[in-house]
Image (cartoon, rainbow, N blue to C red):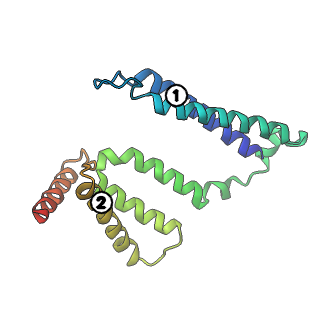
Amino acid sequence: MMFELLFSIALFLFFGYCLFYVSTTVTVSTVSDPLGAALWPQILLVLLLIVLALNIYHLVRKMPGEERNLSRVLSQVDWGKALTSPLFLGIVTLLIYAYLLNITGFLLTSWVLCMVYCYLLGERRLVVLPVFSLVTVVVLFLLFYKGMGIQMPRGTIPFLRNFALSVESLLRSIGK
């Protein structure tokens, strides 16, 4: 219960920062939109903060007195098991993916992410991992690039950027 409370507090702080960021950085729209581009994200973030505050209040009221000792609860955690769990490793992998996406580009980064996630989910066949990941990335790339016309990050490393550009030109020539 203590971890749920700490997680809710962390989410409250993070989404409070997001509300501050959206409120201070979104510029006025050039299109005559009476509500503006920041209104809907602000409404959703305020509603989310209200629900999180209610959840925090409910957790504090429901928590027994002996569980409110944070140092005792943290000393009982098996940190080795917690830090090597597939959930934690998946979260760390996703954070690394988010950091590397603009640097290495969509194709390579997503292929590696898909292989890592398949491995974390239990796939151990070394032939299936790269093939399934490649097919998944190609399908996603086609869906975004051809289906929705969204350009995926190409990367800033020259040979990866050139590779992404060549794949896009190949897809353009196939689609004609």
Cα gap from disc 2 to disc 1, whole angstroms: 31 Å
Mark 1 lies on a secondary structure that is helix
For residue 20, side relative to residue 159 (left or right): right
- Rendered position, 63 above or below 164: above
- Rendered position, 17 above or below 131: above
Residue occupying image coordinates x 43% and y 28%: 38
For residue 4, side relative to residue 133 (left or right): right
Viewer-closest of 29 and 136: 29
Q: Residues within 10 Å of mark 1 (few under 14, many from 20)?
A: some
Task: Name the residue beneath numbered marker 1.
Answer: 19
Q: Are marks 2 and 1 in contact (CB under 8 Å)?
A: no
Residue occupying image coordinates x 78% and y 38%: 58
- Rendered position, 141 above or below 60: below
For the C terminus, the image quarter is: bottom left
For residue 142, side relative to residue 17 (left or right): left
Task: Name the residue beneath numbered marker 2.
Answer: 143
Residue farthest to the right? 65
Viewer-closest of 143 and 5: 143
Say which mark, if any, is on residue 58.
Answer: none
Amino acid, disc 2: Leu
Image coords of residue 50 (percent x, y): 65, 32
Mark 2 lies on a secondary structure that is helix
* Image quarter of residue 87: bottom right
Residue occupying image coordinates x 29% and y 65%: 138
Residue occupying image coordinates x 78% and y 40%: 59
For residue 7, side relative to residue 27 (left or right): right
Q: Looking at the image, is mark 2 or mark 1 earlier in the sequence? A: 1
Amino acid, disc 1: Leu
Image coords of residue 120 (percent x, y): 52, 65
Image coords of residue 157 (percent x, y): 23, 47
